[in-house]
Amino acid sequence: MKKKKGGKLKWIIIVIIAIVILGGVFGGDDESENTNVQSETKTEAKESKKKITYKKVSAGILSEALEKNAAKASKEYKGKYLEVSGKLGTIDSDMSYVCVTTGEFDLTNIQCYIKDKKQEKKILDMEEGDKITIRGKCTSVGEVLGYSIDIDSIK
């Protein structure tokens, strides 16, 4: 029996090429993901340096806009910074959110998410039905769940 020359070398080269190809396919995304994370961080830093202007709106106006045309309300308020005035509604027992209402029978939900201990302390000093003004960014608008706002400050 004769052994072919280069038989082992051929298989070693094939394995090395396969490893290089697999490494390129599965390992090449790390750098691009880091770039995306860095870009998002830079964008957030720029946004925090900008002076924010809040659009003043009452809970009643938000409720009415949502009832008349949810798509239009979403276009008008989603992603915007709002100063919402109304009455304090539900206070979540876990202190993750509060609701702002018109004070009357209201089917629209305006959930405002608490960010820090300072905001929690402010809410703990209040009761349902108290007048409240929330400043924050409206993160979502929907006909079923209503409005979601990340709180920046509470008056």
Image: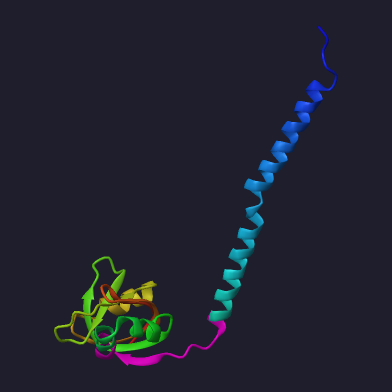
Q: Quarter of the image holding residue 110?
A: bottom left
Residue, far right: 5
For the residue pair 14 and 122, the one nearer the viewer reads as 14
Q: Residue furthest left?
A: 105
State which quarter of the image contains the C terminus.
bottom left
Q: Nearer the viewer, residue 74 or 83?
A: 74
For residue 36, above or below residue 79: above
| Residue stretch in magenta | 48-63
Residue 108 in the image: state x and y as whole percent.
23, 80
Q: Is residue 21 above or below residue 93?
A: above
* Residue 62 in picture, x, y percent from top left: 29, 87
Q: Which residue lies at the image location 27% right of the left edge and 73% below the top edge?
A: 145
Residue 21 figure quarter: top right
In the rendered image, residue 48, in percent from the top left (x then y), is placed at: 53, 80
* Residue 93, horizontal then vertical, whole percent: 23, 67
Q: Considering depth in this image, is 85 or 80 the residue closer to the camera?
A: 80
Q: Is residue 43 magenta?
A: no
Placement of the N terminus among the 4 image quadrants: top right
User: Which residue does the image show at 43% across and 84% down from the upper left?
Assistant: 80
